């Protein structure tokens, strides 16, 4: 199962079940995860951790 098929299945779930309120939550979680991964071990990391 590829990553694209998981995203397509999630998109179909949102369309069929009318759960559009989940989209911003998932988007924010992906963005937060990418931010943590990209700044891990950099000089910016202490400032990011101070936000939380």
Image (cartoon, grey):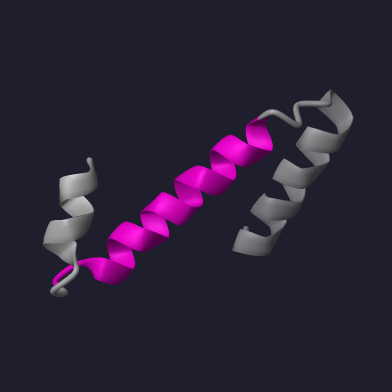
Indicate the quadrant containing the N terminus: top left, top right, bottom left or bottom right.
bottom right
- How many numbered discs? 0
Of 5 and 38, nearer the camera is 38
Indicate the quadrant containing the C terminus: top left, top right, bottom left or bottom right.
top left
Percent x, y of residue 21: 69, 28
Please report the residue visible at 30 percent of the width from the left and 64 percent of the height from the top: 37
Q: Is residue 3 visible?
A: yes
Q: Judge from the rendering whether residue 50 lies leftward or rightward of residue 4; answer left or right.
A: left
Query: Which residues lie in the magenta part?
Result: 22-41
Q: Does the magenta run of residues contain 18?
A: no
Please report the residue visible at 65 percent of the width from the left and 51 percent of the height from the top: 6
Q: Is residue 14 above or below residue 34?
A: above
Q: Is residue 45 above or below residue 20?
A: below
Q: Is residue 49 above or below residue 15?
A: below
Q: Name the quadrant containing residue 35.
A: bottom left
Q: Judge from the rendering whether residue 43 lies leftward or rightward of residue 6; answer left or right.
A: left
Percent x, y of residue 39: 25, 68
Of 44 and 8, nearer the camera is 44
**Residue ranking furthest to the bottom:** 42
Q: Main secondary structure of the magenta part?
A: helix
Of 1 and 5, nearer the camera is 5
Q: Is residue 2 visible?
A: no
Please report the residue visible at 38 percent of the width from the left and 54 percent of the height from the top: 33
Please report the residue visible at 40 percent of the width from the left and 61 percent of the height from the top: 34
**Residue ranking furthest to the right:** 16
Q: Is residue 5 above or below residue 27?
A: below
Q: Judge from the rendering whether residue 3 lies leftward or rightward of residue 52; answer left or right.
A: right
Q: Judge from the rendering whether residue 16 lies leftward or rightward of residue 37; answer left or right.
A: right
Q: Does the magenta run of residues contain 37?
A: yes
Of 27 and 51, nearer the camera is 51
């Amino acid at each position: 199962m590829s990553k694209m098929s998981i995203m397509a299945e999630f998109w179909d779930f949102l369309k069929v079940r009318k759960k559009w309120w989940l989209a911003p939550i998932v988007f924010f979680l992906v963005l937060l995860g990418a931010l943590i991964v990209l700044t891990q071990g950099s000089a910016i990391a202490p400032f990011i951790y101070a936000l939380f």
